[in-house]
Image (cartoon, rainbow, N blue to C red):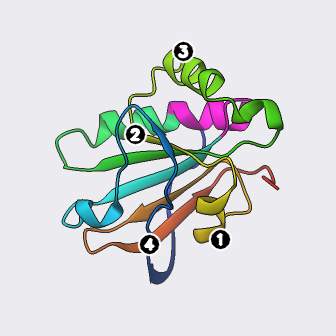
């Protein structure tokens, strides 16, 4: 099992998501989720650590069901073939990912979150502040 403990960090305002394509839902804005804690997780369908990490995300979702915790996925491709929407949709379906998932093909969201690694998750509190993160090892770009 991966370490899903979130390391505390200096609280910073979570950046809004840039305009992009979304899977499983229309565009999501973090500002509309104020009042709810959110886990924003960056993943990649061709990365074994990401696939293992997604199982942990599902466990967290089950563990905190009923606690008003929101989950938002950010698919961050490492290779050009991973930018194809239909491939990400297929992978998300196979992985039973039902969370809103932003397609971060240009890495704009990863840069906004200062994320050089995939997979990684950020814990955003009910006020929209990043209060912790959890890195799961491989360099993204």
Kindly tell me whether residue 97 is visible in this rendering: yes
**Classed neighbour count for the residue bearing mark 4: other residues with Cα under 10 Å, few (<14), some (14–19), many (≥20):** many
In the depicted view, which residue is nearer to us: 80 or 35?
80
Is residue 135 in the magenta section?
A: no
- Give the labeled residue for mark 3: 94
Q: Secondary structure at mark 3?
A: helix
Residue 64: percent from left, percent from top? 27, 43
Location of the C terminus by quadrant is: bottom right
Residue at point 25%, 68% (across, down): 126
Residue at point 24%, 61% (across, down): 32
Name the N-terminal-most of marks 2 and 1: 2
Residue at point 47%, 61% (across, down): 17
Location of the N terminus by quadrant is: top right
Q: How many numbered marks are there?
A: 4
What is the quadrant of residue 49 in the picture? top right
* Residue segment shown in magenta: 44-55
Q: Secondary structure at mark 4?
A: loop
The kind of secondary structure the magenta stretch mainly shows is helix
| Residue contact between numbered discs 4 and 3, judged by CB atoms under 8 Å | no
Using residue 67 as the reference point, say whether residue 122 is left or right of it. Answer: right
| Residue contact between numbered discs 3 and 1, judged by CB atoms under 8 Å | no
Residue at point 30%, 49% (across, down): 70
What is the quadrant of residue 52 in the picture? top right
- Give the labeled residue for mark 2: 100
Residue 85: percent from left, percent from top? 61, 29
- Give the labeled residue for mark 4: 14
Kindly tell me whether residue 4 is visible in this rendering: no
**Classed neighbour count for the residue bearing mark 3: other residues with Cα under 10 Å, few (<14), some (14–19), many (≥20):** few
Name the N-terminal-most of marks 2 and 3: 3
What separation in Å lies between label 4 and label 2 (alpha carbons)? Answer: 17 Å
Q: Is residue 125 above or below residue 102?
A: below
């Amino acid at each position: 099992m991966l370490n899903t403990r979130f390391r505390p960090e200096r609280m910073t305002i979570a950046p809004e998501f840039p305009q992009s394509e979304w899977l499983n839902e229309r565009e999501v804005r973090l500002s509309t989720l104020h009042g709810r804690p959110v886990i924003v997780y960056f993943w990649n369908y061709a990365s074994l650590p990401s696939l293992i990490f997604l199982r942990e995300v599902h466990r967290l979702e089950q563990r905190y069901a009923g606690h008003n915790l929101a989950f938002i996925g950010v698919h961050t491709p490492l290779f050009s073939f991973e930018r194809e929407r239909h491939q990400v949709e297929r992978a998300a379906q196979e992985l039973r990912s039902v969370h809103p998932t932003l397609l971060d093909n240009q890495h704009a969201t990863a840069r906004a979150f200062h994320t050089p690694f995939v997979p990684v998750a950020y814990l955003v509190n009910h006020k929209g502040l990043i209060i912790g993160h959890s890195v799961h090892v491989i360099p993204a770009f």
